[in-house]
Image: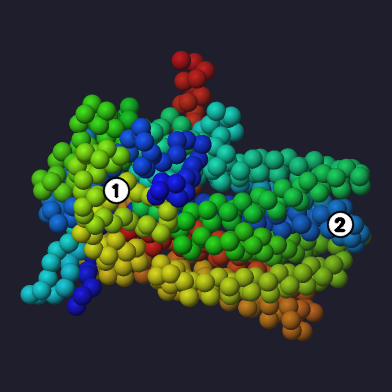
């Protein structure tokens, strides 16, 4: 036997864990909801105007939870202020860019929502354009902050921001469909959102699922034909420890099943679309879990 | 000639690496694994020098068994911060808490560290750790990231780092790699040196003589663990829940543990909130 057996080593923690995965999911859902909100006021698709307010309020609420998670996740919570002080701010740190985005995005979004509420098309569109750039950038950053760590082979891929943005788009729509469904049950009949609109959103979600599957396939090929670490990451982490969030939660529950619902006559049933939306929103969280924790897992033995 | 072709990168806003730069020092360590006997004096010396809390290490000695009886051998590999010339941790730190010293040390400023653990994620070598919340000496920092300093406080007084001083086999050799008369430079010129993960381009200042690839390989550390190590790992993860929120015990369902990690995070909030309250009280009334 030529190979050695490791008999002693010290162990290490996974530095970023559940809190960060929840944060990634929340930012994604927020960005996705906001994209839908902007359809009416920024891109001029008038039939989406009625749901703009609900969508942007959902996006704001999702994002409001983020600083709570992130600040209390710090070892020294009060020192989050350092992230914004000129003498401390570090231009090369991805987290520095993220801080700027996470603080500016909700402000822009609140102003946009105000103008939507006031029915002011000019300012809603102007601020909406800025907000949508910030929304996409904020979620782009969540992919980048993990990507720019060359030592984390599972995260170090240029697909990361795209995977995150696609996940954001589908989970945001999924969550919004659920919220609109609940809203329709509560509000008066005249204020209800037309079901055809929700069906159309589900159709967009289906396109997102196809693109997501394509990206996951690319990532799968890279890990399968990759370096020793990447192959091991795939075998041990994704198909081993994180098999449930990766294979079952993301692929099966969050991708294959909702896709099946949305391409078969099941989509004609209200329950079918609601179920697909729920599964997509939950399934994307599976991706957040393996992406954050799985990428760091193998190295904790090293 | 070599220097002309070397790509000079500045990782972050701080000093660029000093490898081969005239007029600058580049403190480095060569670890001669042929001489390492695995006594772990270096670990003890480091713990004693800095009062490192339980459960975290600035340096440690990885150990493995090669072959099978009668052709077998026990191998060791001391690990510590590589004080890279191009440290990813320095580049990624959002508050400039960690920086590259002009003489090659990668250092941590506790007063700037916010405990975001970006550097821990960035470090390819696991060389960083978060200091636990509870320490015996209340005056020492907690919940900030800590790392090996190459004992800069000793080196600046003309001494070698504590681990080098304590090494009974003389396996750890320390000095200025830019000084051709130093012991490390002489070793570097006549011995075959290897570094950990050279493909990452971090240009580590810690190099090894007689390194075994099986100890240096990251996936191998997982796949070829002994049964005892597997149990130890799970015990470590179970006992330290709350120190980090991403630890998953192997062989148990993943998602319930993810939920438990979230509960663990919520449980730390009152403790941290008390720290914030105390800081306000100190600022306003004292």
Which residue is pictured at 66% across the width and 44% down the height?
A: A101
**Chain letter of disc 1 in the image:** B
Residue A9 placement (x, y as % from top left): 25, 57
Number of labels in the image equals 2
Please identify the quadrant where the C terminus of chain A is shown: bottom left
The residue beneath circle 2 is A43
How many residues crowd around disc 1 within 10 Å: few (fewer than 14), some, or many (20 or more)? many
Residue A254, can we see it? no
Residue furthest toward the front?
B1
Is there one chain holding both mark 2 and mark 1?
A: no
Q: Which mark, by number, is residue B206?
A: 1
* B175 to the left or right of A49: left
Which residue is pictured at 23% across the width and 60% down the height?
A: B211
Determine which quarter of the picture holds residue A214.
bottom right
Label 2 SS: loop
Residue A197 placement (x, y as % from top left): 85, 67
Which residue is pictured at 59% across the width and 64% down the height?
A: A159
Which residue is pictured at 48% across the width and 64% down the height?
A: A154
Residue furthest toward the left?
B70
Compare residues B265 and B3 and report the one nearer the observer.
B3
Residue A67 placement (x, y as % from top left): 60, 43
Callout in the foreground (2, 1): 1
Residue furthest toward the top?
B286
Query: What is the C-alpha distance between the residues marked 2 and 1?
Result: 56 Å
């Amino acid at each position: 036997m030529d190979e050695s057996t490791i008999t002693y080593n010290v162990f290490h923690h996974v530095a970023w864990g559940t809190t960060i995965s929840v944060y990634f999911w929340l930012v994604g859902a927020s960005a996705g909801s906001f994209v839908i909100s902007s359809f009416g006021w920024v891109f001029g698709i008038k039939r989406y105007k009625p749901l703009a307010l609900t969508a942007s309020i959902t996006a704001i609420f999702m994002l409001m939870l983020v600083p709570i998670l992130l600040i209390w996740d710090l070892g020294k919570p009060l020192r989050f202020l350092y992230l914004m002080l000129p003498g401390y701010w570090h231009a090369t740190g991805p987290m520095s860019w993220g801080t700027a985005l996470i603080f500016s995005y909700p402000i822009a979004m609140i102003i946009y929502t105000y103008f939507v509420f006031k029915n002011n098309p000019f300012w809603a569109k102007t601020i909406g354009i800025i907000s949508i750039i910030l929304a996409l950038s904020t979620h782009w950053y969540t992919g980048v902050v993990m990507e720019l760590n060359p030592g984390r082979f599972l995260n170090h891929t240029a697909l990361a921001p795209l995977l995150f943005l696609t996940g954001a788009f589908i989970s945001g729509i999924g969550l919004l469909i659920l919220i609109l469904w609940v809203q329709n049950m509560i509000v008066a009949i005249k204020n209800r959102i037309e079901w055809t609109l929700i069906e159309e959103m589900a159709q967009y979600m289906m396109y997102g699922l196809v693109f997501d599957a394509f990206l996951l396939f690319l990532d799968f090929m890279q890990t399968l034909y990759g370096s020793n670490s990447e192959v091991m990451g795939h075998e041990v982490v994704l198909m081993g420890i994180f098999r449930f969030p990766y294979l079952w939660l993301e692929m099966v529950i969050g991708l294959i099943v909702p896709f099946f619902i949305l391409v078969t006559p099941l989509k004609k049933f209200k329950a079918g679309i609601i179920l697909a939306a729920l599964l997509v929103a939950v399934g994307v969280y599976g991706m957040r879990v393996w992406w954050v924790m799985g990428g760091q897992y193998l190295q904790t033995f090293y | 000639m070599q220097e002309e072709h070397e790509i000079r990168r500045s990782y972050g806003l701080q000093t660029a690496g000093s490898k081969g730069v005239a007029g600058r020092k580049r403190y480095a360590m060569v670890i001669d694994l042929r001489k390492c006997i695995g006594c772990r004096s270096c670990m003890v010396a480091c713990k004693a020098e800095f009062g490192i809390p339980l459960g975290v290490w600035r340096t440690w000695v990885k150990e493995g068994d090669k072959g099978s009886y009668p052709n077998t051998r026990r191998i060791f590999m001391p690990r510590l911060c590589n004080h890279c010339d191009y440290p990813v941790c320095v580049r990624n730190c959002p508050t400039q808490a960690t920086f590259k010293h002009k003489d090659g040390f990668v250092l941590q400023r506790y007063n700037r560290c916010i405990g975001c653990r970006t550097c821990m994620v960035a470090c390819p070598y696991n060389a960083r750790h978060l200091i636990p919340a509870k320490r015996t000496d209340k005056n020492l920092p907690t919940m900030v990231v800590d790392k090996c300093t190459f004992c800069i406080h000793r080196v600046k007084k003309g001494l070698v780092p504590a681990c080098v001083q304590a090494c009974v086999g003389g396996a750890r050799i320390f000095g200025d790699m830019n000084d051709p008369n130093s012991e490390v430079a002489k070793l570097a010129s006549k011995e075959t040196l290897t570094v950990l993960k050279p493909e990452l381009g971090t240009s580590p200042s810690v190099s090894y003589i007689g390194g075994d690839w099986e100890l240096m390989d990251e996936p191998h550390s997982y796949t070829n663990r002994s049964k005892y190590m597997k149990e130890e790992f799970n015990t470590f993860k179970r006992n330290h829940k709350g120190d980090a929120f991403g630890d998953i015990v192997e062989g148990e369902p993943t998602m319930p543990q993810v939920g438990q990690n979230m509960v663990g995070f919520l449980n730390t909030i009152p403790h941290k909130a008390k720290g914030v309250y105390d800081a306000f009280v100190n600022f306003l009334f004292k």
